[in-house]
Amino acid sequence: MPPRLPLRKRVPPSPYSDSEDRPTPRSTTNPPQRPRLRFPRPRLSPPSREPHPPPPPPPPPFRKILIANRGEIACRVLRTARAHGIPTVAIYSTADVKSAHVSLADEAVCIGPPASSESYLDIDKVCRAIEETGAEGVHPGYGFLSENARFAERVEAMEVNEGPHGGPTGVETNEEKKKEKKKEKEKE
C-alpha cells in the first residue's frame, strides 16, 4: 500500500475585514510613499464649443496650365493638377478626340491632324493654344516638346512658366548631353 499524503492544512481567516486597511509589509527596496497633497487647480476658462475654422487653402501657383502632351503622361499631370486645384487645358489632335486626357481636362483645344509633326510638335500651334486659353503655365510632359530648346525659348518669351525642366537653359544642357553621347558612340 502506498503511503498516504498529508492533508492540506486549513488557513485561519484573516483578522482584518475587507473594509479595513491592512498593514503592508515594509520592504527595503521601495521607500514608503508620501501621501499626495491635493492643491486646488487653477480655474481655466471653459474651452469654446465651436471649433476653429481650418485655415483657407493656399492659392494655386497658376490660374491655369496647359499640358502639351497626350496619353498616360498627360493624364498623370492632369490628375496632379486637379488634386492641387489648378484648372487644366489639354491639347489634342483629331485622332485623339476621345482620349482620356481630353476628357480629364477642364478645357481642350484641337491643334491639328493626327500626325504628331503637324500637331503636338508644331510649336506655333501649341503657342497659339496657350494664348487662346490664357494659360499661365505649360507642362510639356516627356518627349515631344519637353526637350526642344526653341519651344522653351518661345514659352519664356510669352512670359509663361514652363516646367518641369526649368526653361531653355535646362533643355539646352540636356541637348548638349545627347550630342556628347553621340560623339562618344561615333568615336568607338
Image: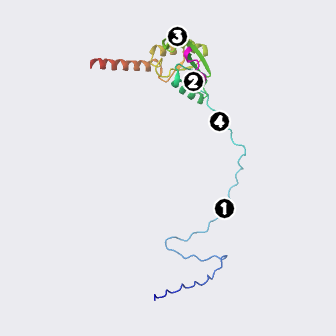
- The C terminus: image quadrant: top left
Amino acid at circle 2? Ala
Q: Are marks 4 and 3 in contact (CB under 8 Å)?
A: no
* Residue identified by numbered label 4: 55
Asked if residue 158 lies left or right of residue 51, the reply is left
Residue tagged 1: 39
Tell me which corner region of the image, top left, top right, bottom left or bottom right, holds residue 90.
top right
Q: Return the x and y of residue 101 as percentages of the image width and height.
A: 56, 23
Crowd tier of the residue under label 3, counting other residues whose Cα lies within 10 Å: few below 14, some 14–19, many 20 or above? few
The image quadrant that residue 112 belongs to is: top right
Disc 3 designates what residue?
124
What residue sits right under mark 2 in the picture?
100
Figure check: 46 above or below 182: below
Residue 142 in the image: state x and y as whole percent.
47, 22
Specify start and end residues of the magenta stretch as a single range. 93-104
User: Distance between the Cα atoms at labels 1 and 2?
Assistant: 69 Å
Give SS at disc 2.
helix
